[in-house]
Image (spheres, helix red, strand yellow):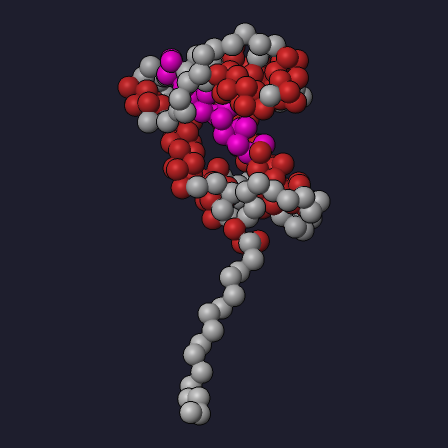
């Protein structure tokens, strides 16, 4: 249910994540998240020449790897060190699946250990609310919407596979919020958490005069 709310335009990819083997689900979900991170970085760019962007993000370009994208996003202040660190863990989990010559699952020792290092926010009581009702709730009661959404994001997070997928859902939502921030900033809309670089600097302290006052 929650995938449909986060991305209605990629139903086939979402179906792959939910229905495939552990290895396929891990790789597809990671690729899904990396595409979102790429969109986030491109949205932050002021000059978006398609040829230059393609050269930067593809193949041996400077942003051709997930690690490079993650480092740049953190360096730009798009998210804190804790997110940067957990994205590295997600990358390591993906690589364990991608490079293993033997059959591996989320219950494989090394992969399970990495997944259990992923932190999750406090869980809320699960709800069977529909996507349409969830969207209406967003307009009517934002706090209730947030509680229900987080419950949906953490659906099945009590399993190792569910924990990995839930964390990707959370980061997918985070990147979407960052994209919306960037879009609104471009329109001159005041944001609830403006970029620190855009905050006005405090006035410089005045130095005491070297000249003594005459009595």
Taking 168 as reference, is 160 left or right? left
Farthest residue, direction bottom: 214
Decide whether residue 160 is among the magenta residues: yes
The C terminus - image quarter: bottom left
Q: Residue at x 55, y 48 (%)?
A: 195
Q: Could you say which is closer to the camera, residue 97 or residue 42?
A: 42
Counting every numbered tag in the picture gives 0
Q: Position of residue 164 (x, y in %)?
A: 42, 21
Q: Position of residue 2 (x, y in %)?
A: 56, 16
Q: Quadrant of residue 85?
A: top left
- 108 sits to left or right of 192: left
Q: For the N terminus, give its image quadrant.
A: top right
The residue located at (57%, 53%) in the rendering is 198
Q: Image height check: is 178 above or below 164?
A: below
Vertical order, 20 against 67 (above or below): above
Query: What segment carries the magenta color?
Result: 158-176
Task: Answer left or right for 164 relative to 200.
Answer: left
Whether residue 208 is visible: yes
Q: Name above or below for residue 114 compared with residue 80.
A: above
Q: Is residue 13 visible?
A: no
Q: Is residue 209 magenta?
A: no
Which is more toward the observer, 48 or 117? Answer: 117
Q: Main secondary structure of the magenta part?
A: helix
Q: Residue furthest top?
A: 128
Name the residue rendered at 58%, 9% in the picture.
129
Residue lying at 67% horizontally and 51% vertically, measured from the top left: 47
Q: Position of residue 183 (x, y in %)?
A: 66, 40
Question: Quarter-wise, where is residue 119 in the image?
Answer: top left
How far across and how far down the image is residue 80, in percent?
44, 41
């Amino acid at each position: 249910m929650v995938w449909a709310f986060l991305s209605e335009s990629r139903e086939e990819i979402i179906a792959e994540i939910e229905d495939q083997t552990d290895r396929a689900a891990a790789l597809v979900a990671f690729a899904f998240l990396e595409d979102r991170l790429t969109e986030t970085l491109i949205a932050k760019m002021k000059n978006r020449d398609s040829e230059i962007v393609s050269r930067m993000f593809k193949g041996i370009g400077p942003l051709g790897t997930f690690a490079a994208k993650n480092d740049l996003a953190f360096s730009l202040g798009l998210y804190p060190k804790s997110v940067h660190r957990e994205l590295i863990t997600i990358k390591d989990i993906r690589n364990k699946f991608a490079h293993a010559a033997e059959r591996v699952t989320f219950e494989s020792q090394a992969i399970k250990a990495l997944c259990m290092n992923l932190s999750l926010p406090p869980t809320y009581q699960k709800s069977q609310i529909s996507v349409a009702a969830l969207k209406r709730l967003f307009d009517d009661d934002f706090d209730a919407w947030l509680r229900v959404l987080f419950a949906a994001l953490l659906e099945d997070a009590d399993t190792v596979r569910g924990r990995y997928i839930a964390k990707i859902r959370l980061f997918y939502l985070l990147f979407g919020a960052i994209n919306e921030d960037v879009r609104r900033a471009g329109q001159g809309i005041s944001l609830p958490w403006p970029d620190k670089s855009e905050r006005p600097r405090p006035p410089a302290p005045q130095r005491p005069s070297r000249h003594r006052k005459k009595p």
